[in-house]
Amino acid sequence: MEYREHQTPGDGSFKFLTSLPTRVKNGILNDNKSFFAALGGFSDAEGYFGLTRGRNQTAAAAFGVSNSNFQICNDFFKGLRQRGCSGGVYGLREVDGQTQWALTISSKDVIPMVDQLILRHEEKIAARNLVRRLAGTPWDEACPKYKAFRREIKLGRNACVLAAKREYENRKRIRQIKIQLEQEITRRAHSLYVAGLRPQFIATLLGRSQRTIYRRVAKENDRIQTQRKTREQADQ
């Protein structure tokens, strides 16, 4: 889990990823660019941008981040309060015996705040843009558009999972084919050796080094001897 820390050394600036610490440093909390870069990285990993039904049947912007580390959520909330945002940190649910904490802010503060976040996750950027566009519009119009967006995200994730599964199965099948090929080469090397061919000729024929042929022949000899002993013991 990571968040970005934005530093501005000398006349330039750069962003880099660091492992998520247990606290947000005061230097980050007190510097706008660093704070919104760090919160943006945290939001890429742990945040959400959404819509809720607001007053007068209009769409209200929603934003939050959740994590099992209460302290880091509270530190980010402290930084948001310094910048005039209201909200809170509360226990969301229990996950494997740990409390999952959620940081949320008031709907009125969402758009001004998220406009300053430095995001990199394409899904989060798209969600922020959609929420920015639909916030304040009639709920009956905004809700179907937001739900359609969430469906597309879910379908995209499912497609990625399916593609990864297929890739894994393909790789597994390729490994199996390679294993079968090497087993066949081992059997052929042994057969040719038993037939009287010299190892250097077998190596040239099968496209393997002479040392490999010696090892394969010895391995096949061991396998055959083991099978023979097993049969003999079974016959006794």
Image: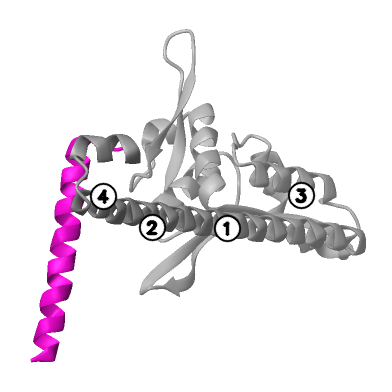
Measured Cα–Cα span from mark 1 to mark 4:
39 Å
Q: Which residue is mark 1?
A: 166
Q: Is residue 66 magenta?
A: no
Compare marks 1 and 4 and give the one earlier in the sequence. 1
Magenta region, residue range = 208-236
Q: Residues within 10 Å of mark 1 (few under 14, many from 20)?
A: few
- Inspect the image, locate mark 3, and give the three-letter code of the amino acid beneath it: Val
User: Between marks 2 and 4, how big is the CA–CA gap?
Assistant: 18 Å
Mark 3 and mark 4: Cα distance apart in space: 71 Å
Picture coordinates of residue 49, whole percent (x, y): 67, 52
Instruction: Label 3: state its secondary structure.
Output: helix
Q: Are marks 3 and 2 in contact (CB under 8 Å)?
A: no
Type of amino acid at the residue the image marks with label 1: Arg
Quickly name the residue at label 4.
192
Residue toward you, 156 or 196: 196
User: Looking at the image, do the residues carrying marks 2 and 4 touch, with CB atoms under 8 Å apart?
Assistant: no
Question: Is residue 122 found left or right of 57 in the rendered image?
Answer: left
User: Would residue 234 be counted in the magenta stretch?
Assistant: yes
Q: Residue 195 at x, y = what percent?
A: 22, 52
Dot 4 falls on a residue whose secondary structure is helix
Instruction: Say whether disc 2 or disc 4 marks the residue closer to the N-terminus.
Output: 2
Q: Which of the marked residues, 3 or 2, is nearer the chain's N terminus?
A: 3
**Which residue is label 2 attached to?**
180
Task: Report x, y in % for residue 24.
Answer: 39, 41
The amino acid marked with disc number 2 is Gln
Question: How far is mark 3 from mark 1, CA to CA?
Answer: 34 Å
Q: Earlier in the sequence, mark 3 or mark 1?
A: 3
- State the residue position of label 3: 131
* Label 4 crowd bin: few (<14), some (14–19), many (20+), radius 10 Å: some
